Amino acid sequence: MRVDYRRAALSEHESAKDPFEQFTRWLDEAIAACVPEPNAMSLATVDAAGAPSSRIVLLKSVDARGLVFHTNYDSRKGRELEANPRVALLFFWPELERQVRVTGRAEHASAAESDAYFAQRPRESQLGAWASPQSAKIASRDVLEARLAEVRARFAGTVERPPRWGGVRVVPARFEFWQGRASRLHDRLQWTREADGWHIARLAP
């Protein structure tokens, strides 16, 4: 099970000086290539004892401030992020033979940002955010269905955002862009945030 990567190359001279611009460029190319769920990313956190955990979440927005996803703040990842905001993200687009790694710190998005995104969600997703005590143990699927029925009856009209549900912004300190190359001599370019801006370095594969 071995693939020799030959689709493209990644050059310091052709890459954007700003890693957010480079990331947006690659994300747009993944979308144009019809990569399944191109905004899916692995989020890695650590608990109070330093034990790591990871899961797939969906990127919902990106700008010069950082990369944003949404979650229940009382979920396992929410609690771990509040205890230790240092995180890692990984995007993998195998169809393009590309990865992007991001490390940085997580912070809550503003209430206004979270409200605006929640208002755009499908109604059933809004109700689900109220019904699910994310990461908590439940006795059965029936319990979850019963909670959903209660929430559906409670919100006949507009569904307001749960107070402990909202956006999380990852503020990057480092990006690494990986382009698969032949003979396992892959291109790896790293953008590191310094006091005077972003610095680019090539890493050995």
Image: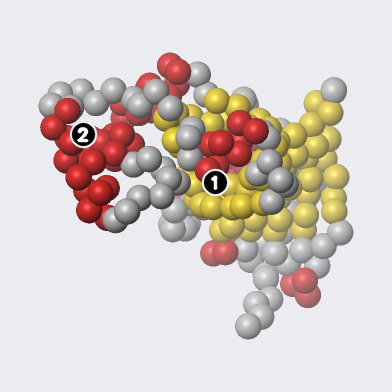
Between 118 and 91, the one nearer to me in the picture: 118
Between 59 and 49, the one nearer to me in the picture: 49
Residue 197 visible to the viewer: yes
For disc 2, the neighbor class at 10 Å (few under 14, some 14 to 19, many from 20) is some
Colour basis:
secondary structure
**Which residue appears at 57% of the width and 64% of the height?**
94
Q: Which mark is residue 154?
A: none
Above or below, 83 against 97 in this view is: above
Q: Quadrant of residue 196?
A: top right
Q: How many marks?
A: 2
Query: On the image, numbered disc 1 is attached to which residue?
Result: 27
Percent across and percent down for residue 21 are 64, 35
Percent across and percent down for residue 144 are 27, 47
Q: Residue furthest top?
A: 112
Q: Residue furthest front?
A: 139
Percent across and percent down for residue 202 are 85, 50
Q: Disc 2 residue type?
A: Val
Between 193 and 137, the one nearer to me in the picture: 137
Q: Quadrant of residue 124?
A: top left
**Which residue appears at 32% of the width and 53% of the height?**
139
Q: Secondary structure at mark 2?
A: helix
Q: Residue furthest bottom?
A: 1
Q: Quadrant of residue 77?
A: top right
Q: CA distance from mark 1 to mark 2?
A: 36 Å
With 151 as the anchor, is 19 left or right in this view?
right
Query: On the image, numbered disc 2 is attached to which residue?
Result: 151
With 123 as the anchor, is 47 left or right in this view?
right
Q: Disc 1 residue type?
A: Leu
With 23 as the anchor, is 127 left or right in this view?
left
Which sits earlier in the primary sequence, circle 1 or circle 2? 1
